[in-house]
Amino acid sequence: MSPASSPTDAWRMKKSLVALPVIMLLTGCSFLATETVSTIGEVSFDTPLAIPPIADSRVDATGTRVFELTAAASETRFGAGSATPTWGFNGSYLGPTLVADRGERVRVAVTNALDEPTTVHWHGMHLPAKMDGGPHQLIAPGETWSPTWTLDQQAATLWYHPHLHGETTEHVMRGLAGLFLVRDDAEAALDLPREYGVDDVPLIVSDVRFADDGSLDTEARRFVGPTGNELLVNGTLGPYLEVATTVTRLRLLNASSARVYDFRFDDGRDVALIASDGGLLESPVTTDHVQLSPGERAEVLVTMAAGETAVLRSTPPDLGGPAVTAGQSAGNDSFDVLELRASNRLKENASVPSRLAELERPDENAVTAERRFVLDGTQINNHEMEMDRVDEIVRLGATEVWDVTNNMALPHSFHVHDVQFQVLSIGGEAPPAELSGRKDTIYLRPNTAYRLIMRFDDYADAQWPYMFHCHLLWHEDQGMMGQFLVVAPGDEPALRESDHEHGG
Ligand code: C2O
Ligand code: CU
Ligand code: CU
């Protein structure tokens, strides 16, 4: 699948002491480091934004809410050009939105109608490792996998996508991704917009590059992986959204392989950031921009006046680090994302609550283990992922601090399965307000250390591991991933243990 002289081979040659100019020379021939894309002012906004349908479900005799997803190949017409071969769940591209309540037991029957294996991972979900849908839960062609679990976490915008070792980029970029919305009473009690697709609108943002024959170009040409030169929002090219209410809730998901977005409106208006990956913040953060790296989500409230339009854009993100960071990350690009069109009469539908949630923070005095993760090249702690090697053993019920360092001048990110963590510090400083809530994925600025606190409750399994990894999908595919087991007292891990030094 990967060509012999892929960008990673160049990175493997790199030792961390090699100076940046040498790295640039090593990689310059295969990477498009100089291409800068701007679609500002060039997007026609002539297509109504597609809204992924809410997935059908039924409640079976045991009270379990049952969903069905089928992954299959077909084709999609995104624009005027030729049809694009795509993959989707229950449709040609992306998948339906699963919605369920905290406390509900759910089961998702996932059928693989592709002619190759895939998996479906529930990103952000707290659930048993065996149900997690990582690389160990392969679904063979023609088979159905039916994980079941009970939702027990704060209301949140989660998502699902394939997670098979080495092929995640390809499967996600072809279109296999969808949202999973968890609802709960605390969120339902707030005066927030919540009419799906009307004033509570999902925005799944992916960057794509169409080849001349209409197919999606998924090749990695930069250190960060594949980046596109135009955007799809919920699979729509050039989308607009008619707004009929004063307040609109946008649920943003960066479903892209490698690109970091910095979303803002063309007129610089403020929005209220109300939620991050794991759900509502304690109180809204007034801001004029929201930066999201791959896999991250945010919910914002946008207030509009009758008759006006506002264009959501993505402008060059603040990636940290030297200029090479942006150059190797497509970080100088700008996009027109979506036009919001307010009608001439708006219904007053909601307000911006001043208080959103009470978040219990894991107790720092209760920390029983501290682990260190250093990301360099496409390795974590000098290791690449191996399916039969477990890298960390966590005790059930433990509160831990994970000290995660990006040891390079280039971007990475960090995602942990099973838990929602909270950020204690970034480079020794307290995190900004937008990172004060629950997170499962975080952008790692170059040469910066992040201290994350998390608790591993409820689910122990000595055999089936969870993953932690860089969520730049092509890095993940290169092996920038490790495995951890959560074990109950007295349980012997059933996987070969890593020989690296543990911090804990
Ligand atoms: Cu969104 Cu381990 O993945
Ligand atoms: Cu995940
Ligand atoms: Cu990475």
Image (cartoon, rainbow, N blue to C red):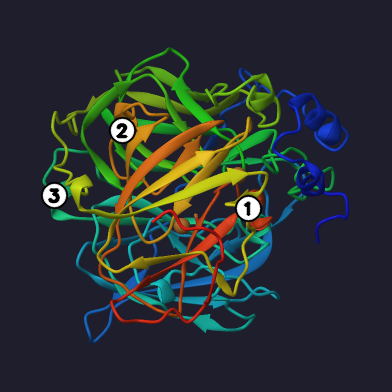
Q: Position of residue 202 (x, y in %)?
A: 40, 44
Horizontal and vertical percent for residue 122?
43, 62
Q: Residue at x 13, y 41 (%)?
A: 190
Mark before the other along the chain sequence, 3 or 2:
3
* Side of 253 where 248 appears, left or right: left
Q: Quadrant of the N terminus?
A: bottom right
Query: For mark 2, what is the residue?
Result: 248
Figure quadrant of the C terminus:
bottom left
Closer-to-camera residue (373/172) = 373
Disc 1 marks which residue? 382
At x 34%, y 71%, the residue is 57
Q: Which mark is residue 186?
A: 3
- In the rendered structure, which amino acid carries the disc numbered 2? Thr
Q: What kind of residue is marked 3?
A: Ala
Where is residue 241? Give x, y as percent.
44, 34
Looking at this view, name the residue that lies furthest to the top. Answer: 267
Identity of the residue drawn at 50% across and 49% down: 373
The verdict on label 1 being within 8 Å of ligand 3 is: no
